[in-house]
Amino acid sequence: MIRWRTMILSIVALTVTGLGVLLLGACSGDDSSGATTPSSAANSNVSSAKIQVVAAENFWGSIASQIGGNKVSVTAIITSPDTDPHDYESTPSDGRRVASAQYVIYNGLGYDPWAGQLLDANPARDRTTLKVQDVLGLQDDDNPHRWYSPDDVLKVIDQISADYKKIGAADASYFDSQKTTFETVALKQYNDLVQAIRQKYSGAPVAATESIVSPLADALGLNMLTPYSFLQAISEGTDPTAQDKATFDSQIANKEIDVLLFNTQNARPDVQRLVDAATAKGIPIVEVTETLIPEDATFQDWQSKQLQDLQRALAQVNGR
């Protein structure tokens, strides 16, 4: 009886062993046909995974996406034209995005303080951060709208490219190529318009409803007649002084300005009153926005459209 029991146990053991060998063989066959072990999967991720990028605003996100090409995945937090970046309140999903990002881009200069707060609340040892304010060496009270400065945009492009090459060193030559193409091809119309307006209309008197376009006016050589204290007050959501209001009213009434640049995303009643007064005087209104419109536009298409509108308005007034 014991002998038969021993024989049965031996047969069971051999059967289990045989099945184990078959299963191992099947797993080995799967691996040779393309499945990966944990270690090989990790190695694959190192070489093929995209750099995860979060941009606080979509204008910086558009630039980052085009420089990174198919080696990056970019998510912008501020995308809707109806959202004011100054007053934005971050959400838990924003925090999760920042926490998992390898690279975060934000403006600084008091424009998006919530972005810095998200970074502080979600520390990550291996994350790279680009703060535009630091790249440009600006103070907290400087004009925050640096994406309206062509020279500053180029400096940010340089930094984004350099950071990509550090994060994804294996793709450094790809990022160099992307940067060159972006600067020489994608930005060509934008750069040509900046140069053409500067050459033809430098010194032309203009006004604006807030400080968003001040860096651009400087780059174009335009003469911004609106008191900067007025521009800054509207941008910060405070009331301009009575003297600044009177100066602006006088400039419109006497047609001392060729064009009024109007940020349509900040059309509070006192601003709309100025726009209506300028329209009544036959002064061309050029609409500008803080963020991409439409929200899926590229940085260069958005900016070029506004520059074309400005160029046409200046030509209408000056007859050339």
Image: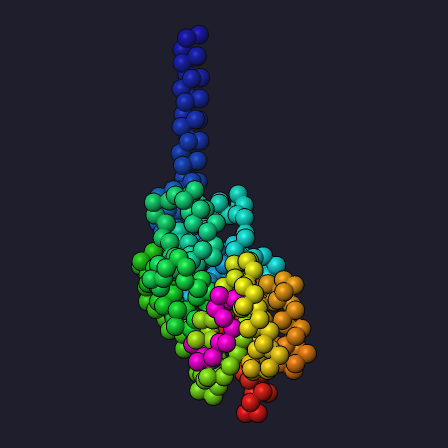
Q: Residue at x 66, y 75 (%)?
A: 277
Is residue 188 in sight in this rendering?
no
User: How many numbered marks have been drawn onto this rendered protein structure?
Assistant: 0
Q: Which sits in the foreground, 271 or 291? A: 271
Where is residue 190? Give x, y as percent: 47, 77
Against 253, is 87 above or below? above
227 part of magenta stretch: yes
Q: Residue at x 41, y 8 (%)?
A: 2
Which residue sits at x=48%, y=66%? 229
* Image location (x, y in percent) of residue 282: 65, 82
Residue 33: x %, y % from top left: 43, 50
Farthest residue, direction front: 243
**Residue 218, image quadrant:** bottom left
Question: Where is the N terminus found, in terms of image quarters?
Answer: top left
Segment colored magenta? 219-231
- Give whichever of 164, 220 is nearer the camera: 220
